[in-house]
Amino acid sequence: MRAAAAHALVSELRVLPRNEAAEREALGRLAAWAGQFTPAVSIVGSPVVVSEVPPAARARIPCGPTTLPHRPRLAHPCASPPPALVLEIEGSLALFGGLGSLLQRVRHGVRQLGYAVTLAVAPTPLAATWLARQGGEAQVTDLTRLPGVLFRLPLRVLGLSEKQRTLLRGIGVRYLGECLRLSRHGLAQRLGPEFVLALDRALGRLPDPRPAYTPPPVFTGRLLLSSPAEHTESLLFPIHRLLLELTGFLTARAAGVQTLTLELHHEASTTRVRLDLVTPTRDIRHLTVLVREHLERVTLPRPVEEVVLASNVLRALAAHNQDFFGEPRPAIELRAAIVERLRARLGRKAVQGLSQVAEHRPERAWRYVEPGTAETTVRSGRRPLWLLPEPVPLELHGDRPYLDGVLLLERDRERIESGWWDGHDVRRDYFVARNQAGACLWVFRELDGARRWFLHGVFG
Amino acid sequence: MSLESLLQRADIWRGGLAPPMSSLPSGFAELDALLPGGGWPQGTLMEILIPRAGVGELRLLLPALARLSQGDRWVVFVAPPYIPYAPALAAASLDLSRVLLVHPRGERGAHADTLWAVEQALRAGSVSAVLAWPFHANRLTGSPSSPMRNGSRQSPPSRERERDGMRAAGEGWGGDATFNVLRRLQLAAEAGASWGVLFQPEQAATAGSPAALRLRLEPAAAGLHVHVIKRRGGWPAGPVTLGLDDAVAVHPPARSCARRLHTRQTRARTTRR
């Protein structure tokens, strides 16, 4: 149908030019995502020409999900058939619990990514591609049943050239079965030897090895928004799709990400959001929560038109076996998850671990560290549970330190003299003191200068 | 419906019988006797009312925290009033590599972020205990002399700051709103099988609370008076007096003889003066 005719039928029709480069890119990302189901994923763009034929043929049960663009498209009669993905799934059936459950997962996953899908299962990749193009959800797992199914296929699914189609139409052939009844020699002479070879491959008489799709080393996913997003909330849905693609990609590579960059493209500028994780992960729920927390802190200067999600170098991350008693993830990853979640909203510095430092000066005997990386050193004397950020000068009543009453010092004192080498030397006598209110305090007196008294800690 | 069949119901319990709940020994036998289940109730929210920060509230919890830190979950401090001092925590055999400090200072207001962080931590499932000081969030940056607030000689600026702090905290913390917030935290603690401890000012004693256990601490010369204001399956009880120094392992440094002599001489000089 011509565009003008379509406009005449539906006045509010929006005609968009087909972006083949974007389609190819999307199909590539889908192939990388599908790697989680089988290592042998190949893209079928145009009719495949295989130049060399290995001697032994293997039985294959590929399923070819044919992806169709989401938006309604004006199909030109001569347009080449839509590209497809071929997955060899025979080796994955046991892992995913049988054909039905595997197909359901593929179908559900592709739909979540926002694509429509037609699945077909056949023992040869070419037959699966043709069956998927036909549109019916055929499932043929038995090679002996294949000819019967292929016989009824219309010729348009073969992706023939205009000349070949005219010729076959001229001799009254409409279905593949009629074509198979003709003599091989005559067909090869009139339509070319590739045509006959393709028929042989489809029927499993000749092997049909496909080059497996090699995913790129890092993930980059982009999504053009159908309408510019003015608020970060409306970005969550498209970003969730990209995250789904990312996690499929990571599952296929048995890897996790530790740093993610989210680029929000505006008309003329770009907002960048960087996610740093404590441990590599590919958990979709965790990543979604983190992205949401990060986006809440972002104010968009202008509406967002395109979203790009990119990973940096991938880290190896083994799949974990599900525990029988239902602990889904190892403890270390669970611990990292809450740290990242708190940091996503409160900032990196607001969430810290605590460590001891081998040092006599009390204010330097500890420091903030990355959570979970604490060191424990030798034990020192009696120390308060709370340390004041800075020592506070105490008032004097007579020659006694005073804080809510005169402080009663305990008999033991601890002299700390240290730090002459770095210019922050300390010469102090530390006491445990109590006041009338029952507070137990850690105070010290300088040994030099004015010999002032300070409060340094509370035995809380 | 007969009385017997009514008593069979899981959601009905009789006064005087503690409902089944998992608990962790507190490390103080006198206190365990008062607590439902014989220890700190786990998977619940608990409130400790204190007259000021640093009366001994942390030492009260330390034995239990030390035990929890040996597991593979975090012990989280949210908005502590001062710096939890690493050497003292380590000396109490708390595993520092399981300690997480959270200092919310967000643009949304520290108080809202504190409560958010507490809820997230409780719900996470990877946290065994959350200690939170929602009222003292501003203390860390405020005047360090504020813990001694019941003193008569408090300087006016610090008292003013104190009031400001209470007002700021009170805005999101009063009446029904408070009850609902605590209810959320209680549910989060149940969901994450975590132990939530909120430190509250004494004034909160009159307000209703969904917390499973509420204690009031009162410093005393002999140690610490612990009043049980509310407990599940029991009436208010106490006070029980705990000598906290016994619970914390104290390791005095091995001093050389010369040092000891020096100390003695200094002390002698001091007394002469």
Image: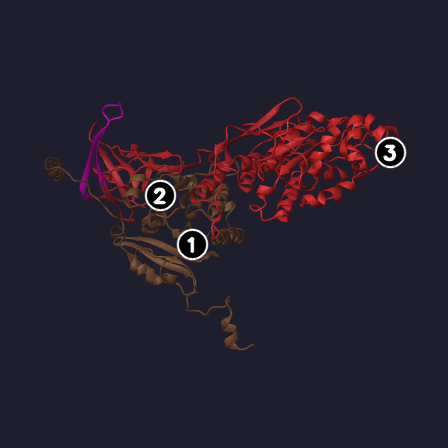
Chain colours: A red, B brown
Magenta span contains residue B138: no
Instruction: Indicate the secondary structure of the residue bearing disc 2.
Output: helix
**What segment is highlighted magenta in the picture?**
A410-431
Residue A362 - label: none
Q: Chain of mark 1?
A: B
Residue B147 - label: 2
Q: Amino acid at mark 1?
A: Met
Residue identifier under label 1: B46
Instruction: Indicate the secondary structure of the residue bearing disc 1.
Output: strand
Q: Amino acid at mark 3?
A: Ser
- Residue A114 at least partly seen: no
State whether residue B238 is above or below residue B203: below
Same chain? Circles 3 and 1: no
Residue identifier under label 3: A11
* Residue B136 rendering spot, x and y as whole percentages: 42, 43
* Residue B142 rendering spot, x and y as whole percentages: 40, 37
Task: Say few, some or many: other residues with alpha carbon within 10 Å of mark 1 (under 14 / 14 to 19 / 20 or more).
Answer: many
